Amino acid sequence: MPAFASAASRPDASPPAGRLRGPRGGLTVRRSIFLTALGLAALAGVAGCALVPDGTDEERANLRAAGALYDQPLEQRTLPDLPASPTWQEVLRRAFLANGDLEASYFEWKAAVQRVEIASAYPNSNLEFGYSYMFSAEKMKAFDRQTFSLGFDPSMNFLIPTKVRQQGRVALDDARAAGERFRAAKFDTQRRVLSLWAELRMLESRRQVQHEQVRLNRLSIDAVRARAQAGGVQRDLLRAEASLRTQENGLRNTESELSATRAILNGLLVRDPAVAIDTTGDSARTIAATDDQILAAAVELNPEIAAIARQTEGRADALELARMQWIPDINPSFMFTGNVSQALGATVMLPTTIARIRGGIREAEAMLRAGEAMLRQTRTDRAATLVATLVALRNNERQAALFEGSLVPLAERVLQNTRQAYAAGTAMYIDLLDAQGIVLDTRLVAIEARSARDKRLAELESLMGTDIEAVGASPVPASSPIHQMTPDPKEAPHGR
């Protein structure tokens, strides 16, 4: 490695070395000590600096806003208690504060933000202080036998500021990608919680309907049995009994599914798996946004696409950093030997590992191309998935509206007319039971259609990366529990 040095030795060489007398010798000693102290102070002053890129403070602010409550351990954290009949907002807010997977994603983001300062630390090499003492038969002062050197660790090149800043940009891109992954984890938690919540509501409603169906089937068996004893067809009784057994089996299956779903949801909420959850106090969610608004929001806010985009930006910056390896590094140093000499020097590290540098550049180019291809394909896939989910959601809405608005009222009118006919003696008791069964069957289909619609909505929000209530709203509502982690979502600002 080539080196150059500029040395300034004491010009007055007439007296023997080590026999400096008078004010000039004292001045030289003081000058050497002063220069050493000045160099140490300058290096110490920059030792705690970091050449962080623009946008780091904004990312830190986003981090603080998103996870202030995670800074306390779960044991010291106050989780909101669910009321007797919670709403989906209350259930979701507790899940955000208690879910361990989401908390782990937050701390991964926090670690990535800290790595920005690590990558931007300047100087990037440790300070090295050297000392040697010369043994000689010459008559020299003890101070002139001592050599002091100050420089950087030779095992690590002292990078120029441009390279350090570029390292910080790469680390910031990774931190932003980690932030988007945290946002994706939030919406994945939202999807799981709201899907389980919709499933729980559906199972509870189905159980009530099936209880009523079993009761009607038992009444139907009594009527068929009486008719069979009066000379009716025996196979009608067998069919009625088979239908009753089938309905009882369906009821048991629903109760088992209900217990399992409740246990899974309580697990996400960090509660006892057997604790009951009353879903009757919740109301159905409405969608005010149009399909165009939903698609526009999804293209702009999808967290998975945003994470890959940030990752691709990082690979572009990594390519630029790989190209910077052609720039030589310079390791400065300072040394003085008593009053004899003082020297400032620098070691220039030439980029002679050509094959390694070219290989690093080609690797970075390949990774960038891979990221661009991944981003392009992810956009295509998510757009197709989003459209398919939106189509299914609208179909579920249509089906739910059809049954709730038309078929269920129509079945209830048929039941009312049958009751009137039975009271007038123009209809049989078995006809009345059949009409009641039709109403229950229609209600059950409407309940399942509504549950399917709510699950599709949770999937849609996960793909969009935003709360459906915030799409198309002006101004954006601040009450969305999707975008903040504060104890009272109604008082928190709309955030990331």
Image (cartoon, helix red, strand yellow):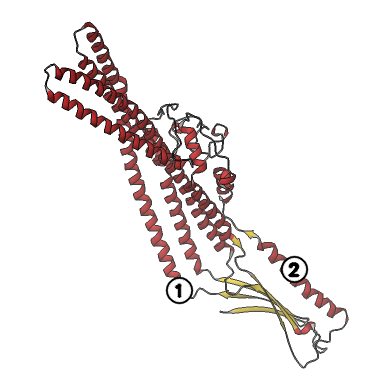
Q: Residue at x 73, y 66 (%)?
A: 41
Q: Is residue 496 visible?
A: no
Residue bearing the label numbered 2: 38
Figure check: 145 above or below 295: below
Q: Nearer the viewer, residue 265 or 292?
A: 265
Q: Nearer the viewer, residue 180 or 377?
A: 180
Q: Nearer the viewer, residue 339 or 388?
A: 388
Which of the 4 image quadrants contains residue 428? top left
Which of the 4 image quadrants contains residue 253? top left
- Answer few, some or many: residues within 10 Å of disc 2's Cα (few below 14, many 20 plus, some between 14 and 19): few
Position of residue 386 measured from the top left corner of the image (x, y, whole percent):
34, 40
Residue bearing the label numbered 1: 354
Q: Considering the numbered disc 2 on the image, is that residue within a helix, a strand or a loop?
A: helix
Query: For the residue marked with disc 2, what is the amino acid?
Result: Leu
Name, please, the residue furthest toward the top. 424
Position of residue 333 measured from the top left corner of the image (x, y, whole percent):
66, 74
Q: So how many labels did they put on this image?
A: 2
Position of residue 442 measured from the top left corner of the image (x, y, whole percent):
27, 24
Figure check: 301 above or below 29: above
Figure check: 66 above or below 41: above
Left or right, 316 with reference to 23: left
Q: Residue at x 51, y 51 (%)?
A: 109
Q: Residue at x 34, y 42 (%)?
A: 383
Query: For the residue marked with disc 1, what is the amino acid?
Result: Ile
- Answer few, some or many: residues within 10 Å of disc 1's Cα (few below 14, many 20 plus, some between 14 and 19): few
Name, please, the residue furthest toward the front. 229
Position of residue 238 measured from the top left corner of the image (x, y, whole percent):
16, 27
